[in-house]
Image (cartoon, grey):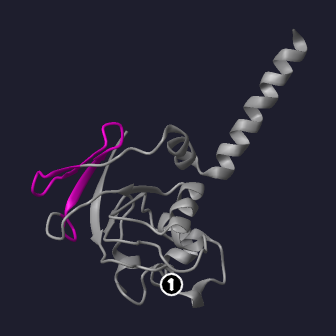
């Protein structure tokens, strides 16, 4: 699978209160949350972000509280992937559960810039900066996490339950 999109670049230690400030947590609706994303550190983000854009950040992205609103908000903005040097563990798990793809990759400060265009090849574990043709390798997620991220934990669980029931019905008919 390949995706491409424009870059929104962030520094180290972007916490969940920067992603979605606490005062806007009055709803769980992704589109409503998305209107307030990064309001205090990049006020233009919610108005200018495009479906399929990619966040590139430094270390410890998603630190802070354990709220699921942060990855949900990003999905509401149309962000499908976040690339960072490292992620806060609870943000990482919440993102997988909700279907937000995360890539841990060591990228130097000047190798990817705001508004660059990236192409990500998940099958081969490569990120290509289409503006300077640099290629970055990343470790692919385990297959189970890829499956979870593809549709999110709830829909993945529903699918597995449905498959199990169908198999049980087949067994009964034999």
Secondary element type, mark 1: helix
Spot occupied by residue 82 in the image (x, y as percentages of width and height):
38, 62
50 and 12: which one is in front? 12
Q: In which quarter of the image is the C terminus?
A: top right
Residue sitting nearer the eye, 130 or 112: 112
Residue 64: in magenta span: no
Where the N terminus falls, by quadrant?
Answer: top left
Please identify the quarter of the rendering in which residue 22 is found.
bottom right
Q: Is residue 125 left or right of residue 15?
A: left
Residue at 56% from the left image edge and 67% from the top image edge: 90
Disc 1 residue crowd, few under 14, some 14–19, many 20+, Cα 10 Å: many
Point out the stretch of residues depicted in magenta. Answer: 112-136
Q: Residue furthest right?
A: 172
Of 93 and 149, which appears nearest the observer? 93
Residue denoted by label 1: 17
**Would you place residue 116 above or below residue 146 in this image?**
below
Give x and y (percent) for residue 20. Answer: 51, 81
At 53% from the left and 49% from the top, the residue drawn is: 149
Whether residue 134 is in magenta: the answer is yes
Q: Could you tell me residue 19's position as x and y percent?
A: 46, 78
Q: Estimate the x, y position of residue 32 in percent, counting from the top left.
A: 57, 76
Image quadrant in which you'd find residue 161: top right
Viewer-proximal residue, 128 or 86? 86
Where is 138 relative to 52, above or below? Answer: above
Give left or right: position of 46 versus 31.
left
Give the residue at x 30% y 57%. Answer: 105
């Amino acid at each position: 699978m390949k995706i491409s999109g424009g870059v929104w670049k962030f520094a180290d230690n972007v916490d969940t209160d920067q992603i979605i400030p606490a005062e806007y947590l009055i709803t769980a609706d992704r589109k409503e949350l998305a209107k307030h994303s990064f309001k205090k550190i990049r006020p233009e983000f919610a108005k200018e972000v495009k479906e399929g854009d990619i966040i590139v950040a430094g270390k410890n992205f998603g630190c802070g509280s354990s709220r699921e609103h942060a990855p949900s908000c990003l999905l509401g903005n149309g962000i499908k992937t976040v690339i960072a040097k490292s992620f806060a563990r609870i943000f990482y798990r919440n993102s997988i559960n909700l279907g937000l793809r995360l890539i841990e990759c060591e990228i130097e400060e000047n190798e990817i810039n705001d508004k660059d265009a990236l192409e990500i090849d998940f099958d081969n574990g490569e990120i290509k900066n289409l503006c300077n043709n640099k290629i970055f390798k990343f470790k692919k997620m385990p297959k189970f996490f890829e499956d979870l991220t593809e549709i999110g934990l709830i829909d993945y669980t529903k699918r597995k339950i449905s498959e199990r029931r169908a198999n049980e019905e087949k067994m009964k008919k034999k």
